[in-house]
Amino acid sequence: MRRNVSFLLIVPVCLLAFMCFAQAQEIHGTITDPSGAVISGASLRLTAGDMLIATATTDQKGNYSIRAQRACSPCQLSVSAEGFAAISREVRLSATETLALAIHMEIGTVSESVSVEAKGYPTLATTQQEVSASEKVHSLNAAELLSDLPGVGLRQSGELATIPLLHGLGDERTRLLVDGVTVSNACANHMNPPLSYIAPSSATEVTVIAGITPVSMGGDSLGGTISLNSPLPVFADENEGWRSEGTLSSFVQSNGENYGPALSGWVANHNFGIGYSGSWVNAGDYTDGSGHKVTSTYAQSTDHLVTLAAQGSGNLFVLQAGLHHMPYQGFPNAQMDMVRNFAETLNFRYKRNFAWGVLDARTFWQGTWHSMNIGEDKSTFPMPMWMPMNTHGKDYGYTVKLDVPFAERHTLHVGSELHRFVLADGWPAVPGTEPYMGPNPFISINNGRRTRLAWFGEVASKWGAKWSTLLGIRNDMVRMNTGQVSGYSDMYAADADAFNAVSHARTDVNFDATALARYEPNRSVTFEFGYARKTRSPNLYERYAWSTNWMASGMVGWFGDGNYYVGNLNLKPEVGHTVSASVSWHDPARKQWEVKLTPYQTYVQNYIDVDALATATYGASTFAQLQFANHDARIYGLDASGKAAIWNDAKFGRGEFSGVVGYLHGERLNGGSGLYQMMPLNARLAFDEKLKGWSGGIQVQAVNRKSNVDPRRFEQPTPGYTLVGVRTAYQLGYIRFDLGCDNLFNKYYELPLGGVNFDDYMASGWMSQIRPLTGRGRSVYVGLTMQLGSGRNQRQ
């Protein structure tokens, strides 16, 4: 332990030794619209990877000049302006070079979803999207920012704890990164998933890699990688002095009376900067399309993030300190609710562009204090009034990555990661409830440890104008252990004694491999195909949830199905083999139209599923006590997406159709039944219009009937449904107004990934037929966003 902590402290200090000086380079030119008129006030950002190098703004004549104080080969020049489609160009600058570059912008939306292909190697099934102001005021939680992306499904749980799934593989089967950091679930019911620690108002960019993930981007996962990032530091130009920028926003949603403000600000000179972002969100119980109140859908959250940054002599330092407080959150599909979740975070990053490559290093720590109990809605049911469950989790570690170009056409990516998670989970005794919940505390996880040390190597190659490849290997060593446990009373002794009598230490040596290739025969079609071997070790609860008592095992389970779960010390790591291909047809500039098809198949050895231990029937409903167990599984499907600009000119603006279709099937091979919570066939179709400061659109979501269900969990089918939403926005100077309506026709529907409504079942006296959780009825939302500060036109 001390050696690990010492190493974490030494890493940033050692990196300081790499500082050196670089000479300035310059890009200059003029930006024009489709008619040839100049565009003033356009924002330019020069980046290398995700490192911001410089910014600039066009003057009244449309001219710009942007200077880089370090080597930049290759780097990305991004340009945005109100009323025009954002664009990105790859540029290469050698030392002291001056580059003249004229830029032509098309009418369109400020924020677009684009394939990440600028790095010169295949990125199959990868999308990257800037988070727009409209999405920030419309989304209650950060996971909702992913809803329109190919391959993504959302498992509804608490209002601020939605969990994304990639091709049916979610939660800890997908790697979730918040500002480059992996945070563990410090809860037996996963009520504090990683994306709950970043507010939508703080997110500026989301990247989704579904299916085949490069080894440098993900380990200890099967489904892929999702990364959400807060804003990069923006420093003043060399002769600008001090600059400031910020955003003040608020939103109101009618169904559930959801509302909240958010504030962000940034002040910087050329070398130093300090920023703050904060938000407060309140959500009340919503009603579904039939007018029925869905209880335990309330929540409240407060988030604060302070950022310190410095640059100089070609170096970038960023230190983030965050506080997260969620005083309560109801869970309609669980027996318990969250009554407190508090977290402190430190995240230090150093990045440096050398002549020979790029060094990117990070060290982080997060402490989480989490409590579950019977929430205010459930306390009116025939349930105990007090049943405290407390956990304390700590995450810390480092990542170090090197990108080294060699032999002109190749880039080597090498690196190492350490992630350690420590968890204490104990349930205090409840006086007067002996022997079920007293007289002693229940020790569920006693100093559980999960330590993952990884090394990876990857080669990206550009074999000319048409072919590029990406080959990588990775090793993750996962060590797990936990201490002795005990129950409330002697009635739990047999299970505790059996668990304590055996060794709890487990070590998994996992290997991943990825092979990707891209072929571009011309500028209008792209083919990609690849294979990935990915491995995930069990989490602490899957291995160490030790009690077979019905009450105790009912407190474990993050699936929203009302069942009871028991761990298994003998679980093996999951090993997924994924093959996938993709073909994309598009116009040469990828501006007017594109159609993309991505079929995939994943075969998972030792998929962590369940075996039935017993069943119990209460009234008209039956529940299962299940033990985690390894089984083989197969998942296959197809993602389809496309867009087409119907018109695009200065007079009528830009009108565009877009759509995403997803088909998914998952099955357990030794048993032939469906895997739990597989999203049925679904589609999202939208039409959007943008004209100067005004924008508007309509979206239709269609979901097919879910019939492929898991009988071991008594999963219920859900009927198909269609939802319609409308939205509009107007930008008046530095103020933006948003107005929209979800579920316009107040449709009643059951959520295919929402699990069961346990609240309704308990309210009926435990005798009714348990039903799937229903979705939100008609809801009108209003948002207001105001840009602040001298540099407010630098970020869109």
Image (tube, rainbow, N blue to C red):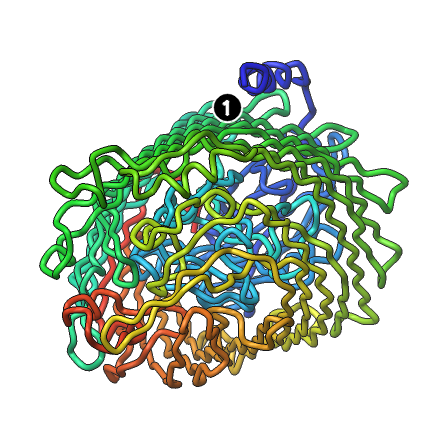
Q: Is residue 739 left or right of residue 29?
A: left
Q: Can you give x and y, in whole percent of width and height, for residue 645 in the image?
A: 54, 78
Amino acid carrying label 1: it is Ala
Residue 352, compared with residue 559, is above or below; it is above
Of residue 392 and residue 482, the one placed in the foreground of this image is: 482
* Residue shown at 72% from the left, 68% from the top: 580
Which residue in the structure is indicated by mark 1?
A: 310
User: Is residue 39 visible in the rendered structure shown here?
Assistant: no
Of residue 748 and residue 138, the one placed in the foreground of this image is: 748
Q: Residues within 10 Å of mark 1 (few under 14, many from 20)?
A: some
Q: How many marks?
A: 1
Residue 658, compared with residue 361, is above or below; it is below
Q: Can you give x and y, in whole percent of width and height, for residue 383 in the image?
A: 15, 56
| Residue farthest left in this picture | 380
Residue 715, by quadrant, is bottom left
* Residue shown at 52% from the left, 49% from the top: 568
Q: Can you give x and y, in whole percent of width and height, for residue 649 in the image?
A: 50, 75
Label 1: which secondary element: strand
Of residue 58 and residue 259, the one placed in the foreground of this image is: 259
Residue 410, by quadrant, is top right
Q: Is residue 354 left or right of residue 767?
A: right
Residue 186, compared with residue 107, is above or below; it is above
The quadrant of the image that shows the N terminus is: top right
Residue 432, by quadrant, is top left
